[in-house]
Image (cartoon, rainbow, N blue to C red):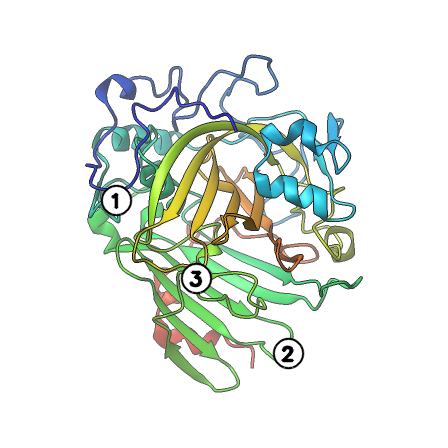
Amino acid sequence: MKYTTWLISATVALGGAAYAAAPEQDMGRLGKDLTPVGAERAGNKDGSIPEWTGGDMKAPGGWKPGTPRPDPYANDKRLLSIDASNVDRYKDKLAPGQVEMVKTIPGYRMDVYTTRRSCGFPDFYYERTKKNAASARLADNGRNLAEALGAGVLFPIPQSGVEAMWNHKLHWKGEGFQMSYAGYIPPKGGDSIGEPLGQEEWQTSPMWSPSNKGVADARGIESLYLNTFTSPPSIAGDATLTQYKFAEANDVWLYFASQRRVRRAPTYQYDAPQLNTENLLTVDQYMQFNGPLDRYDWKLVGKKEMYVPYNTYRLNSSANKVEDVVKPKFLSRDHTRYELHRMWVVEATLKSGMRHTFPKRVFYLDEDTWTILVEDMYDAQGKVWRTTEMGPYMAWEIPACVWAANTSYDHQTRRAVLDRVVAGRKEPDWLATREGRLKEKTFEPDGLRRFTTR
């Protein structure tokens, strides 16, 4: 595969390197030939990726937060469709796992549309990003965040794979949100989509606040997460509370409604199986990647033009019917939009002496948002084991690009987890923290029981 590296001064792995500010000669490029978050402002040579012009920051007329989100690009015509008959023609613009999905899942295809660089952020976000470019620093060989402002990209001109991963770990989607959704794990070989795993989720972070003055304000906390199950009845009321930390293992508490007790769960992280996912997801696959960075060496490979899910308004509309969006093997191909975008490629290789289910992982991060849109996870034989995809869309009320529905496909078992589907549910509340409906005290272990539905 071809990668480009013209934006980085060096391609380095996480080892003994120092992690400091971007080179001075590069910092002046932000807001000029680089966008305020460090992406290339210009389009590509053939124009299939356009120039970034600020993002589509305004909502369509008449739309109000809390109502189903319209698709501003609903009239776009499909440019091409990638399926098993022609995927080899386009494989240089796909991750290996994406190619495998197209080749092996009957009926799977990728419909490609005009690329629209719709993602943008508030001016304060750009200002804080520029300050971070000059002063953000990592410590402990990249494991810890030593100095940075929240509510801004930490390393808009990354010099290492670990810096790019920190950008993802703290990518901004407002100050905090609440979301109602369902996950589906279709049974193998059947025509059923399985029982809905109904869930309510809350998340916030002291590092997402525009008033954050630095790492000290965060008290070592990367983000705070609370999830409760609402269905099926056998697990309704079960809950997980996680305090993600900068440098340490996550603090996790589990509440099982049938036992009416809260438990600490110190081993519920890294490659531990996620609860209620039939061993098809690891804990650190949530949000595409979460948790400490200490088990891998991280290499910034370069950039790659890729077909990725993007502007996924149609897929993520709460006005959808579940049966229209969720299919027995994948999320509806009629509802999933792909576009050509430039992606940062980060390769993670398991350190000597460390243990993890996946000895190698390759992440593909969107240059305009610093979110991981695609990941391939490899087994010990070097074969792609799992592939995940998710696509952003613009939440104009924040304003920022966010995401919901995502897929994790296991190539060994030929099974998928179709997660965070908002069809038939209330719209995500992306302003929950900003408008006072979500506070940090929500994430205290002593209050975990009050979220049970039993």
Q: Is residue 136 visible?
A: yes
Could you say where residue 114 lies in the image, as x and y percent from the top left?
A: 66, 25
Q: Which residue is mark 1?
A: 142
Label 3 sits on a secondary structure element that is loop
Question: Looking at the image, how many numbered discs can be counted on the residues?
Answer: 3
For mark 2, does the 10 Å Cα neighbourhood hold few (<14), some (14 to 19), or many (20 or more) residues? few
- On residue 422, the disc is none
Q: Which residue is mark 3?
A: 271
Q: Please state, as top left, top right, bottom left or bottom right, where the C terminus lies in the image.
A: bottom right
Residue drawn where x is 44% and y is 23% of the image: 4
Q: Left or right of 191: which side holds 132?
A: left
- On residue 233, the disc is 2
Residue drawn where x is 50% and y is 28% of the image: 304
Label 2 sits on a secondary structure element that is loop
Q: Left or right of 207: which side holds 342?
A: right
Q: Nearer the viewer, residue 55 or 376?
A: 376
Query: Mark 2–mark 3 contact, CB under 8 Å?
Result: no
Query: Mark 3–mark 1 contact, CB under 8 Å?
Result: no
Label 1 sits on a secondary structure element that is loop
Q: Left or right of 399: which side holds 300?
A: left
Q: Quadrant of residue 76?
A: top right
Kind of residue sitting beneath label 2: Pro
Q: Is residue 76 visible?
A: no
Q: Nearer the viewer, mark 2 or mark 3?
A: 3
Separation (CA) of disc 2 from disc 1: 43 Å
For mark 3, does the 10 Å Cα neighbourhood hold few (<14), some (14 to 19), or many (20 or more) residues? some
Residue drawn where x is 35% and y is 36% of the image: 153
Q: Is residue 161 shown above or below 105? A: above
Separation (CA) of disc 3 from disc 1: 20 Å
Q: Is residue 296 shown above or below 346? A: below
Kind of residue sitting beneath label 3: Asp
